[in-house]
Amino acid sequence: MIRWKPPTSIHTRLTLWYTGVLLIILLVISGFSYWLLALALTRDVDPVLLELAEVVRESVTSGRGGPGASEAVAELDAGFRDQLVQVVDAQGVPTYLSARLKGQPLPLSAVARENAQRGKPTFETLHFGPRQMRLVTLPVLPKGRPPEIVQVAGSLARSHRALRRYLETLVILIPLGLGLAASGGALMARKALEPVDRMSRSARRITAEDLSRRLELRGTGDELDRLADTLNEMLGRLEGAFGAMRRFSADAAHELRTPLTALKGGLEVALRAERSPEEYRQVLAAKLEEVDRLIRLAEDLLIVGRSGADLASSRVPVDLEQVALEVLDVGARLAQPRGVTVRMEVADPVTVLGDASALHRAARNLIENAVNYTPAGGLVEVNVARENGSGLLSVRDTGPGIAPGDVKRVFEPFVRLDAARDRASGGAGLGLSIARTIVAAHGGTITLETSPGHGSRFTIRLPAVE
């Protein structure tokens, strides 16, 4: 069995839809106009028949019945060409028949007889032999004599011929007009979709190796221009994403190469000469630190590369005060040998929905960053508060602050504003980037308030549970 498949081309589908809708409209209009014409032709016949019937009635009335009336009607009937005349008495017996009836009387319906008794004319359409006729029945109510009925019938052959010619004209003109309209619609659809074809060809030439190319705008401001502008915006985002991916890959390779090179160099030196077990143990212990750094770096890269849905897959109520206490303990251990004071203030208890371990990681990265950049004798303060239906966890330090031009850069992967200090602490410049990724996955934001020489404040804002 062969199944019909719809055309895949929008141009073809538009043409078919346009042609189909136009065909339906033409058929409806043609049918309605045919009905109006038939009604008009019938109404044109009725006044003529009524006028002839009134003339015959006047002849019957003036003839005062009997042979005189029949002779008067016969004289009138002789001048009729397509009409048939019949006069019927009160008992329904014809008193006069047109010669063209050949002795076959015209039918007198019950409705026509009843209307005649009321003095009203009746119009009917009937089949008389092979012909379709229009019949008018008119009462004759003379004074002092029994009532009679005058019937005049006229053929509808001319009306039918006119309707037939009109129908033949429609049969010719509708397909012709439909074909011309379909051809014009196809040309207009092709012209309208030509910019889409150009956009498609231009888009095919854009590859991942060269995302700087853009689709050309025609300057008309129409839907196609808006589509091209939207696609250009998407290409811009893709270009930025691919660029960030390339930079991330290069930075990750660089970060991995440094400890791997150090690990390889240390092992090569250890293997150049015979050493005692204690010396080998010392070398392996030193290289174990490099391995730990590689493991931490690999974990950080996995977190940065994970999607937001993965980072916030487990949504449970989390007490921000408890998270702050846990990271405060980590910060205190890190700050003690540096001579930095760490403290916490809680304005209001706040509960949020999220992954406790992920939020803990984000807050820990902030406090570790604050301790690392705060000089001896400085202060790191952790605050928990509620504001406008949101839970806030902020970390403030009294470090050197951040230059205005670097505020946005600090959240990018592998960015170190103090490279020597950060490398010495074993960091790879991923802490703040990981914190932003985790917070964004929980539907929150992380902001930075800073001033060179006056420290910085990082604030995590998350939707609070009422």
Image (spheres, rainbow, N blue to C red):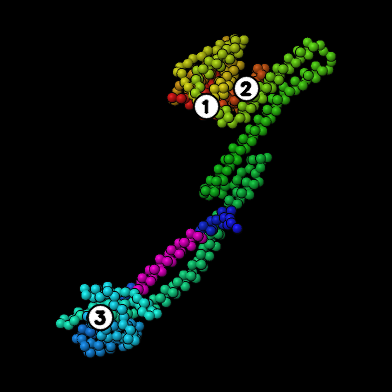
Residue 188 to residue 166: above or below: above
Residue at image coords 83%, 17%: 272
83 or 170: nearer the viewer: 83
- The percent coordinates of residue 44 (x first, y second) are 33, 75
Label number found at residue 412: none
**What element does badge 2 sit on?**
loop
Q: Position of residue 386 (x, y in %)?
A: 45, 21
On screen, residue 464 versus residue 313, left or right, reads: left
* Label located before the other in sequence (2 or 1): 1
Percent of width and height locating residue 17: 51, 57
Q: How far separated are the C-alphas under marks 1 and 3? A: 98 Å
**Is residue 25 located in the magenta-colored stretch of the structure?**
yes
**The N terminus - image quarter:** bottom right
Which residues are drawn in magenta? 19-42
For marks 1 and 3 on the same chain, the one whose residue lies earlier in the sequence: 3
381 vs 419, left or right, is left
Residue 317, placed above or below residue 285: below
Number of the label disc, if any, that sits on residue 92: 3
The quadrant in which residue 368 appears is top right
Q: Secondary structure at mark 1?
A: loop
Disc 1: which residue:
315
Instruction: Name the residue that disc number 2 marks.
Output: 417
The first of marks 2 and 3 along the sequence is 3
**Residue type indicated by callout 3:** Gly
